[in-house]
Amino acid sequence: MQDNPFLPRLYLSGVFYFILMYNGSNVLPIARFLHYTHMKQAYRSTLPHLESTRQSILATLLPEAATFYLEQYGPEKYAEVFLGEFDNPEIIWNTAMRRHLIERIAVHVADFSHRLTSNVRALYQFCPIPLIDYPELTQELFCHVYYLRHLCNRQRFPDWPIRDPIPFLRSCLATWYNELEKKPSTMSADLAREILSVDLSNEEHRKPAFIRRQYYKLAAKYHPDKNPEGREMFERINAAYELLSSESANNSTMPDSHRIVLCLQAQSIIYSRYSQELSEYKYAGYSQLIKTINLEAKDDALFIKGGGDLLSAAIELANYTLISSALNAEQLRRDGGLEALVTAFDRCVPMVTMSSTPDDMPVQVCIHVCDCFATASTFEMCRQKLAEMVSIFGALTRLLQFSHLPRLSTAAAQCICAMSVDELLQFQLFQTGVLWQLVPHLFHYDYTLDEGGVQHSEDSNKQSLANSLARSSSEALAALAGYRENTPDNEGVQKSLRALLTPYICRCMRVETNDMVLKTLNSNLENPYMIWDNGTRAEVLEFVEKHRTSNEPSSTLMGAEFELSVHKNELIVGDVFIRIYNEQPTFALHEPKKVAVDLLDYIRKSSDELNGVPKPIKKNPDDLIEIDWGNGPSSSQENGNTLNTETKVLMVMTALSNLVSANPGVEILLIGNFPLLITYLRGRKHPQLQIAALQVILLAAANKECVTDLATCNITTTLFTLLKDHPKIVARVLDVLIALSSNGQIVKEMLEHGGLMYILSILCLTNSDQGQRLQSAELLAKLQADKLTGPRWTRFINKFLPAIFADALRDSPNTALQMFDSSNEHPELIWNENTRKKVKEIIDKEVETLYQKHIKDPTAKWNTTTLSDDYCAYGDSISGELVVGGVFIRLFVENPGWPVRHPKEFARELIEKVLELMARPTPQIEMVTTAFVALVRNHPNTADQLPAQGYLPQFCTNMGSQKPEASKVAILILQELSENQFCCDALSQLPCIDGIMKSMKNQPSLMRESAHALKCLMKRNTGELAQQMLNCGMVPYLLEVLDSSMNGVSNGAAARAEIVDALKSAILDLKVGTKIQEILEKSPIWAQFKDQRHDLFLPAARTLAVTGAPTGVAGYLTEGMFNPPPMSNQPPPMHHDAAGDSFQPPL
């Protein structure tokens, strides 16, 4: 069929009329036929309002929407609609409309129907049907593919999908323009009647049937097929017939406001749903839109019932276009749109009253205008234009008072927020008293609504709307003050908000969310930044309400003069309530370093007054509250005036210590301020301030840099005097001293200013707090540990306490205290009650002297010239005692197993003393020798160091002394040294044999000890010793000793055995051993001893000497508890035979 050349002329047969008259339900074939053919007919309607569908033969038969529906959705969907009941933005169709269609077609073809009954082969002579009007569509406006009345009905069709929003927007604009520029038809009704020869004076001529007959007659006469020259007249006849047969002649030729409203609302819907897609397009309707707004805003009937719809729709559309693209605001400004909006705003704002409802036209207009102003405020040129129209600022302020219209007030608050990016706009809003309107909304917030977990929306919950208004008001205040990005700081607003809402809330506005700010404002709390409860809120609201409702001009300070009465007795420094912070020291401050600077500044400013400089008298003594919320530490803040200066400074000092304690790192700010704190430490008239300042310094002393700074402040004497002045804080002072002792300069300073005396005075207080005494002991231990000054501290401690205490303090302060409190008498300490009392008296006397000096002059030093090198405060208790290396020799001899603290040092001191006495013997030589022998015997390792220290050559030299005392000492000591491997090796390299032989001769009674030493040396098998024996004649001498009776020798048999072993060892020498053997073989005496071993004559080995005694540790109070039982040193008795030339062990 598509190739049929007669298809475009199919309509002439009237098939479309007759097929649509079918009243059955089997319409799908009809729908398919219509879908295929209706756009292919060579027919064009001449009616101008059918321009969009004039290509369809169905344009005059079906509603325009039905034609589009058929084309868009196809025959199947159209058949469903044709048979159904539909009423939506895309299609309006029902059974009544179908019946009306059939009736109108039937009337149109009535003449042919009569003819057809008489001649079934009669051909239909086509006659265009007048446009069928449907009563259901009388109030409808079809645009693009939608009925705008339904589409704009957001209650029935809130989210009806829109296809092709941009073409639809173009159609809406075109429809709108057409409506605005509506003109009469190009052919008037009179001309049409003239063409068709219709006379209105004749009643018969008014009937549609007569007009139709006239059309048939004239159309047949001038049809182009019969009259080629009648085409123009034929077209005029068609136009005249369509005009007279339709209702167009009765339609108004003036724009319809209702239809314009629908066009504007449709555009608003498009922009609201497709804002992003349309953002790249500049809106093309501003000129007409602004003209509409101006005309409506100046209309005297604007507020008559039913009026204002057009104005509301126009401003709403302007708002949505700005939301879509803020750049449209510039175009709006250039076209004079802002002036038009202000005109409408000025007309509508006064009409908003306490009785207005959210749906009132003035309310809706004001909401949309506020939104437009907010968007326009993003552009500099727009802001300049707005600043020139000063009426809007008072209008915005007025709109904020209608809390029963939360959406309106919210829009006004958001507009204020947007305007706040400009300093001039800020100022103008501030001057109109906008703060008085915004602040009350903050207190209508209910934070429990969101925290309750119940679903809610602004459409159904009034509190949700109130919360939204509160958030917008909070944001507007923050923007006005300059607390938001890109908003300039406004000092006036900030001062007012600091006074009305406190600095804490102002800070929260900067860094916290609006919800957190509002929750804080509507909660009762007491923290270092804020005292807030129902009373303070009522006080603020009362003040604000007074100014909000006042008809007189507001104060020029705009609330900056407001003061809460609850603050009158509070001390406030750096925006912090000092009393509360001291009660809540763990509260996290937002800017602890800034607060620390403020506190130090306050302390500094009060220093002169507390040091005796009088404070100026205030001119207004009745003013009990002076709170400066303001500009940092440089501002003068005098508050809490019911308190005296000392109490204030004490509170501030306590707050400073709490701040440093809770915020590590803040103490670094004290550097440079320690002289100020030390001034308070020296203020003896204010003991509480001394204690508070001490606490701050104690906390700062944990920082190495602070300690370094304190080292330059001469603080030590001040701390020493506090030990005397305040016994209750001794522990705290000692903590400070312990912390400061990590600095070498302070350690030196403490010693130079007599700190030792103060510390020892505490150590000597046996009846006082043991914790303080332990601290003093720990302090002394730390002071001795200093690399540079520590040894000097030890020397000075030893002048007042026995040397063992200095070591004990370093090793175990607790043990040192126990030792100090008890009475002891052992080799390293003689200590009793009398000694303790005398030492304490000396120390206390020295402390009193130093204290008096330091009170007058904190830089006074300790006079140590009276302390000679041999000065000893406990000298009386040790007079007459021989002390070597800190050990009492008498007591050590009595208790040789005592584990001395420094055995090697003691051994060195003893050997030096021995050598000294061997050169110049005194009665002490025997005791010292006994002590040395006991030390080596009980601590064998102590002798290991002697060879390296160079004492053995001196010893060998003194062995040859002719003095009997020296010889005896030499033999006894040599006996012990020979058993030490290191000493034995060293002696074997020295010329010692001659000295041994001389000692044997000088002390025959010690023959066994001499022989034992000789045996031990010869077992080293060194050629030097054998050579010395050969050279000095030791071998013959020993043979003589073997042959002698050894009278006076304690164990002669053992002595002989030792000598035999020594000679046998000498024979083994590779160099001179043969010569020594020859000498021995020549002697008959040697024959008696050479063939057997004589070990059984020797006493049992001294296990203690061989294996070494338990060295242990410096067990200051053990007193030899772990010494092994004494062992017998006596050899078995020796029995001589009758000939006297042999000896045997006892049976």
Image (tube, grey):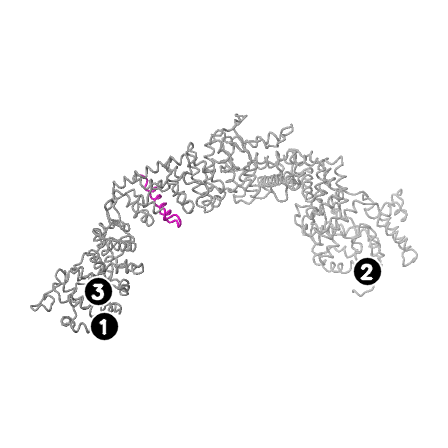
Q: Quadrant of the C terminus?
A: bottom left
Residue type (three-letter) at the residue carrying disc 1? Gly
**According to the image, label 1 marks what residue?**
1073
**According to the image, label 2 marks what residue?**
10
Q: CA distance from mark 1 to mark 3?
A: 16 Å
Q: CA distance from mark 3 to mark 2?
A: 155 Å
Dominant SS of magenta comes to helix
Residue type (three-letter) at the residue carrying disc 3? Leu
**According to the image, label 3 marks what residue?**
1014
- Contact, mark 1 vs mark 3 (Cβ under 8 Å): no
Residue 938: where, in percent of width, then height? 24, 57
Crowding near the residue tagged with mark 3, few <14, some 14–19, many ≥20 C-alpha atoms within 10 Å = many
Q: Is residue 213 magenta?
A: no
Question: Disc 3 or disc 2, which is closer to the eye?
Answer: 3
Please report whichever mark, 3 or 2, sits nearer to the chain's N-terminal start: 2
Q: CA distance from mark 1 to mark 2?
A: 157 Å
Mark 1 residue element: helix
Crowding near the residue tagged with mark 1, few <14, some 14–19, many ≥20 C-alpha atoms within 10 Å = many
